[in-house]
Image: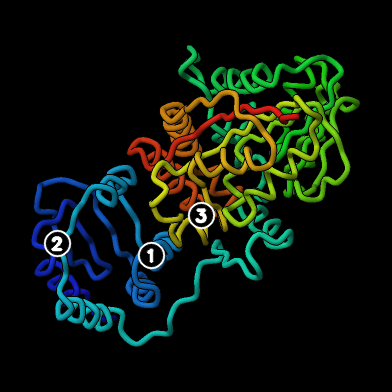
Amino acid sequence: MPSATSLRDEIARVFPDRPFAIEFWDGSSLPSTNGGGPTFRVQSRKAVAHALRAPGQLGIGRAYVTGDIALDDLDAAMQVVTNWQPPPVERKDQAKLALAALRAAGPMLPPSPPAAELRPKGRLHTLTRDARAVRHHYDLPPEFFELFLGETMTYSCAIFSHGATTLEDAQRTKLDMVCTKLNLQAGQRVLDVGCGWGSWVLHAAKEYDVHVTGITLSKPQARVARERAEAAGLAQKVDIRVQDYRELQGEQFDAIASIGMVEHVGEPQIDVYAQQLRSMLPSGGRLLNHGIARLNPKSPEPGPFSERYVFPDGDPLPLSRVELALERAGFEVEHVEGFRDDYAETLRHWARRLDDNLEEATRLAGPERVRVWRLYLRAARNGFETGFTSIYQVRSHAAS
């Protein structure tokens, strides 16, 4: 088997200061230069082949998902990725690194992408492509999500800043906050856009005596939401559909909640989204739009790892763009509230719970998906902690 020695030596030469260590498949290693930091274990020459086939984030991500790269401390590795400023690499050194990597990989066919990877096809944000993208993320066993979401099965930002100390209490705080901001009244007809496994649908129907229609693009989510409504004795107050928001034609509601869904809409459709929601409300009808936003409008869109493995076609827009779409559609924005720290804390709870249940999570979803989720939950938390993203609840009403 080819040796990693030449690749190790080139990395040491080009990056003389390294806050991390590397261990290679042939037993050779490269220590960190600051006496600490995480260890990247390159467990197979296939990892090098992945990096050569797709240089940058995607290739390294593929090697991580397949297990050809392992990490002794995922949180520490995230800190390196976020904070380490490597020196610029001249072209001649780039060529030497590539040549050393080729020698280390040896003669082998380019490895196939992992099974957990999706490359969306077709025109962006068509009904068919959006449905496929959503299914890629959500169509895993519901029991997998329950391992880290907890009993409420609420897959959006919990609110800790109002006094809650447990994840469950913080999620119930959020569910009730949405109802309160919408000023729900008994007997009203309400829409939940992107209802997930039905947490807000059930809360609103039970606590506020309203009829709630929930829509999702995931059949497993819809099945679980219906089962939960039946078990809670709320089946007559709840209507769960597998449906795109653009397919709701000619229906009217008194209020609309959209919780953690707008991030999937994208720039090409955000005005269509706002216009569609406005068309289903009477004058004065309220909308609560709860979604992640990029804080810097000039920041790049999600990278290829998120695009292929986590949220295909996901595109958190700046808050200003969402508000502009709402105003163009005929909404008057009344109140905006940010919960950046709350989402960082939510993700901290989710990551800890997933780590505490790794064996069962792997049984349910497979090792590739578990690696993706462990990395994604930490990367998302990092985005909120560093100010790359935030999350906002925007309450508005349909203007006359």
Q: Residues within 10 Å of mark 2 (few under 14, many from 20)?
A: few
Residue 373 in the image: above or below residue 199: below
Q: Amino acid at mark 1?
A: Asp
Instruction: Give me the residue at 82% from left, 16% from top.
Output: 209
**Left or right position of 74 against 200:** left
Alpha-carbon span between mark 3 and mark 1:
12 Å
**Left or right position of 374 against 369:** left
Q: Earlier in the sequence, mark 3 or mark 1?
A: 1
Q: Residues within 10 Å of mark 3 (few under 14, many from 20)?
A: some
**Left or right position of 21 against 64:** left
Regarding mark 1 in the picture, which secondary structure is present there?
Answer: loop
Q: What residue did someone put label 1 on?
A: 68
Q: Amino acid at mark 2?
A: Pro
Q: Earlier in the sequence, mark 3 or mark 2?
A: 2
Q: What residue did someone put label 2 on?
A: 87
Instruction: Give me the residue at 12% from left, 69% from top.
Output: 14
Alpha-carbon span between mark 3 and mark 2:
34 Å
Does the residue at mark 2 contact the one at mark 1 (Cβ under 8 Å)?
Answer: no
Which quarter of the picture shows residue 360? top right
Q: Position of residue 257 (x, y in %)?
A: 69, 31
Regarding mark 2 in the picture, which secondary structure is present there?
Answer: loop
Residue 88 in the image: above or below residue 299: below
Residue 343 in the image: above or below residue 6: above
Q: Position of residue 9 (x, y in %)?
A: 12, 72
Q: Position of residue 21 (x, y in %)?
A: 19, 56
